[in-house]
Image (cartoon, grey):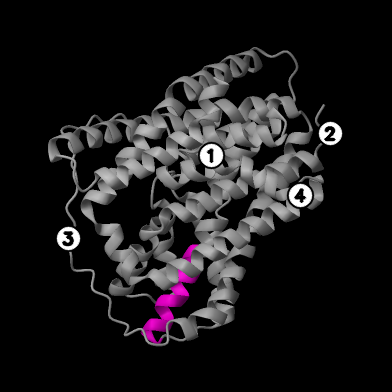
Amino acid sequence: MHKLKDNLLVKVILAIVLGIVLGGIIPEAVGRIFMTFNDFFSELLNFLIPLIIVGLIVPSIGRLGQTAGKLLLATVLIAYGSTIFSGLLGYSASMSIFPQLLEHQTGQINLAEKAKEFTPYFSIEFPPLFDVMPALVFSFLFGIGLSRLKDSTFGKFADDFEEIITYLIQNLIIPLLPIFIFGIFLNMSYSGQVVTIMNVFLKIIGVIFVLHVFLLVLQFTIAGIIAKKNPFTMLKLMLPAYFTALGTQSSAATIPVTIAQVKKIGVRDEIANFAVPLCATIHLSGSMLKIVCCCIALMLIQGMEIDFVQFLGFIMMLGIAMVAAPGVPGGAIMAAIGIIASMLGFNAENQALMIALYIAMDSFGTAGNVTGDGAIAVTLNKFFKKEVQ
């Protein structure tokens, strides 16, 4: 079991490289086989994710007893604060860098091409029993209620359900993740869509990537100061989660790997099992940074006015709206596009540009979200050290 986790980083990197290399030469018939698998695996993930949330959060809150309410409040406040801070960082950096960097941009970007892609041979749909948000609400309410009971039957059921979910994570999801990631990059390489978009937005993407690295170093430096740990050692341990998110483009799909790596940093099981699934839904610092930077870049290119007060309201609202984003690739931008249109005045063309630019580097934002969850878990582990057992 530990060997599998230790080799996961190598497997994910190998899957990414092979997907990119083989995308241009693999026969369509073979590519469609992998897309059929990916379609099935995506359905499986969507089905299991709400159950993973319930299975991990309910018993975790139950074990925390009266600390649960404080821990929940602290996690939400830290996650939201981190998301808002990343938005303000993106605004400040973009307004300082982009005006000069994009000085010679014409403002007309052609996205007329319709890329080819592998299609699955068949699809099997099995919708989840309930969505992510009902799963979170259920977990909070029943977990807090469970924390007030002693030796309850529901508590024993929750513990057994947690063992089942943990078994499925370790023996089903994690072993299949590299194949899923390979299929994603295979299709991206075959279509050529990402390459075209990235060539157009190369400068913007480069700046945002550097900002993501800076944000992660800052997050773990703060967490390291609080917990008295080496921030770079913690970042190194979080790399498997980072690269898994890079491939899956989904914070929720990366939950099993994130939990495993957070525990390796030294976070106790009850904190890790509570904070990681919750932060996968409410902590979106990487996505926030990317959306704000992309919006400012496109507004500068279009010659639109940019007002700080307007953007502050936009950032605060976006931090709430993206919580409703499903745990799927591109979910954050789909949840945010309505606010982008209503608060920033983006028309249909600009919305299309925004979506294209966002999706071109969706992996980096998701990886930033997931890796930053580790810093929050470390901070919570320090703050609640005395209260939890």
Q: Amino acid at mark 1?
A: Pro
Residue at mark 1 to residue at mark 3: CA–CA distance: 33 Å
Is disc 1 in contact with disc 2, using a CB cutoff of under 8 Å?
no
Rounded to the nearest whole Å, what is the CA distance between mark 4 and mark 2? Answer: 20 Å
Q: Quadrant of the C terminus?
A: top right
Principal secondary structure, stretch drawn in magenta: helix
Residue 15 drawn at (x, y percent) = 37, 38
Which residue is identified by label 1?
240
Alpha carbon separation for disc pair 3 and 4 = 46 Å
Name the foreground residue: 301 vs 4.
4
Q: Quadrant of residue 2?
A: top right
Q: Which residue is mark 4?
A: 224
Pointer 2: what residue? 387
Q: Nearer the viewer, mark 4 or mark 2?
A: 4
Of pointers 1 and 3, the one earlier in the residue sequence: 3
Q: Which residues are magenta?
A: 290-303
Residue marked by disc 3: 114
> Label 3 sits on what residue type?
Lys
Between residue 360 and residue 275, name the one nearer to us: 360
Residue 294 forms part of the magenta stretch: yes
CA distance separating discs 1 and 2: 30 Å
Q: Quadrant of the N terminus?
A: top right
Q: Is residue 16 left or right of residue 371?
A: left
